Structure formats: C-alpha cells, structure tokens
Image (cartoon, rainbow, N blue to C red):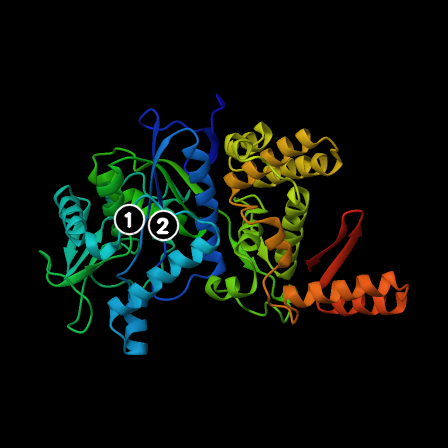
Amino acid sequence: GTMTIQLHDTLRGKKVPFEPLKEGEVTMYLCGPTVYNYAHIGNARPAVVFDLLARVLRRHYKLKFARNITDVDDKINQASIDTGKPIDEITARYIKAYNDDMGALGVQPPDVEPRATHHIDEMIAMISALIEKGYAYEAEGHVLFDVTADENYGSLSKRDLREMIAGARVEVAPYKRSAQDFVLWKPSTPELPGWDSPWGRGRPGRHIEGSAMAEKHLGNTIDIHAGGQDLVFPHHENEMAQSTCVHGGAPFARYWVHNGFLSMDSEKMSKSLGNVLLVHDLIEMIPGEVIRLALLNAHYRQPLDWSDETVASARKMLDRFYGAVRGIDVPEDLRRSAEPPAAVIEALEDDINTPKALAEMFNLARRLNKATDDGERQSLAAGLLAAGDLMGLIQQDPEAWFAGGDDGELSADDIEQLLSEREAARANRDFAAADAIRDKLASAGVQIEDSAHGTRWRRG
C-alpha cells in the first residue's frame, strides 16, 4: 500500500511517520537474551512484538534484522560457578533453548544473530576510539565513559545530567570522575573470562556490546532500535552516547521503539499456571499460538498483565478464529494469493495497533460465520488466514487445533469412542445415558456441539 508506517519514537516522545535512511531498505536492532537461563515470559514480549514489526516491514522493505546474544556477562559467570559447568556449555544450551522456545511462539529467526564474544576486537577498537576522541578515560584497569563530555546525555530517557549527578549517592567507586560514568572495560581476575586489551586482561561492560555489534552488522546509523521499556535507561541511553560520540555526532538510531512492561497478577494465577513463567515450561502446557496472542492482545506500548485470564481469553479468541475457518476448503491458489484485509494492515502499520487488527479479524470471522455462499466463504476465509499469516496466528489445521494437545485425561480416540456411544444412546432414545456421556466429557474439559453437520467437539 501507499500508506506510511507510523511508529512511536521514544527520543521524540511521539508517533511519527517512518522513513528509512536508505530507500527500500531497513535496518533493525533488538536487544536479545543474556544466555544464563531460560527466557522469562517478560523477555518473550519484545521478541514477539518486534517479530510482528519485522513481518510488517518485510511487506514493503528489504529488512536486515539483528537480534544479539549476550554471552559474556556476570550472571553467566555466576551460573558457571554455581553449576560447575563451563561457560560455553551454559551459553550454548541456553542459546538453543531461546531460539527453540521463541520459535514455538512463531518468532521467525533474525537475519543476523551476533554474539558478544565474537565481537571483542570491535569493542576494543570502539573503546580506543572513544578514549582518543576524549569521551572515555582509563582508571585502575577500568575504562569509563565520561558522561559530562556528551552534551546530549540523558536525552533519550529525558533525564537531566546535572540533576542526576547532584542526586547521586556518595560512595562512588574511587576511579570514577562522576557517579554516572559507566564502565566500557573492566579487569578480569584469572578465574573469570577475559581478553587481552591495551588496558590489560579484562572484559567489556554491558553497554559497549550493542554499539559495536550494531555498527559492524548494520552501520553507524540504524533505522530502528527496539527493546523493552526497562532498557531505556541506562542501557539504551549509554549505547546512544557511545555510538553517537564515536561516530562524530551521527545519530545511532533514527527510531527508538520500546514495548511496555509485562507484570504478573499473582492474585489471578491459578494452580494450573502457578508461577510458571519460563517460556520453556509454559509451552509444555499452553499452545505457543495462545502465548503469542496473549502477548499481542494488548497494545505493545501498554503494560500487559500476565494471568490465567490473559491466557484463557487468548485461547477463546483463537477458538473463534479456528471455528470460523473450520470445514471451509479454501483452494490452494486462492490461499496463496490472498492478502490480509486492508483494515488489518492499516492497523498494524499504525504503530503496531494489534487490538485494532484483532478487532478487524473478528469482524471478518463474524461475516464468515454468517455467509452462506461457498465462493464468499472461501474468499473471506482466505483473507482471515492471510491476516493470520501476517500476525503469526491460525497456523494449524483447525481440526488439529480443536483436537487439542492430549493433555486431558482423554485422548482424541477416547473422545471419538464416547461420542459414538452417545450417538448410539440417542438413537436408542436413552437420553439419560447420552447426558451422562456429555457430562463425563465436560468434566474432562471437552465441549460438544451438535449441529446439522453432526457432532463436533473441542477442548476448553
């Protein structure tokens, strides 16, 4: 379409039309996982939200999307000490788990997945350049960024540096010129991972990693820098300072896009979900598409409350989508050529307005449920499925969806067996027996619907 994508830019504090630096091409960087453990449901929100943005951008642009892996970090060192396992064994395991778990939520792989440990030379070079340009200094084996040398420091998070310095707590590390100065390089003791550098054996601070990897893979100025709102300060503020200063004032990112917090409603957590908050465990209990929709159901900039209700309502919404397309045989060529309805695309191009996009999909499902003409039903179903493809939803066969995982006590075969016994009971006018079977199914979480086309069942 000719419509311009709109994005809310944190630096400008408002929604603005998106225009890439290079016509027809977009670069996007997302802060990925620190691989010392499985990803928490809160870490899955940016992965899913910015996967959707990537899908929307790819409709119009050639996108190069980088999502990094932080595989040098004090939490990883601690995990190694706690478990007695070597660092690379820990990081390899959790990198694979992260990609598998996000894949289960329909997250497509990024175009590049740079790892911090593979970019130490680039980090050392960038730190050296910052010292040379007067933005960083060495002290006691540490290299620190001098925030007072950057006149724009604080502009992303809307903080006033003078106030921050004035309000700083007193006991600052003795080698820091000012409390806000942050570490670019720190010394490593012999048992910790370290690399040789002009300042002795050590390892990078956590902010320099993104600046060095983004420069190497995407260039000095990137189009979109994405991440959780919790990273705005200090992480993104510091990345912006490093990159802008080392590149002579060239902007680091043209658009800063941040998703809102995910909070836990412990009051509304039942025993079934309990405090299961690692995606790795959740996907054993809940279909990945349900988790994906639960994460996309609120607008990405709003806080999202994670509870049993969040999950149950996402499951019901998917039941409605799958119910609408169930039993409609969409010809292959129509399925392939179908476009998502314009209203769905328009909503997504307007700062990823998923609540509106989903509402448009429900309008379509309602029309589909009312339509009687086969041709119309096929074309509406093709449009709904195409919208699902863009959103990463309705990706299963509807019959398989309603059969559900065999996590209930009854397998699909058991259910079919009971339904045929119920049919026989009804044919014999033994309604008490038929009702008893319906109750038995209901108590196992299986709902049945009798219609002119026979009996259908679904879980939940």
Does 46 appear above or below 282?
above
Q: Residue at x 52, y 56 (%)?
A: 288
Task: Find residue 355 and report its image quarter.
Answer: top right
Three-letter amino acid code at the position of disc 2: Cys
Q: Secondary structure at mark 2?
A: loop
Residue 426: image location, x then y, percent: 86, 62
Does 361 appear above or below 177?
above
Task: Find residue 409 and report its image quarter.
Answer: bottom right
Q: CA distance from mark 2 to mark 1?
A: 8 Å
Find the residue positioned furthest to the left.
198
The quarter in which the C terminus is drawn is bottom right
Q: Is residue 189 visible?
A: yes
Name the residue that disc number 2 marks: 31
Residue 318: image location, x then y, percent: 63, 49
Q: Residue at x 78, y 66 (%)?
A: 421
Three-letter amino acid code at the position of disc 1: Gly
**Given contact means CB atoms under 8 Å apart, are the residues at marks 2 and 1 in contact?**
yes
Task: Find residue 275 and report its image quarter.
Answer: bottom right
Residue 257: image location, x then y, percent: 43, 41
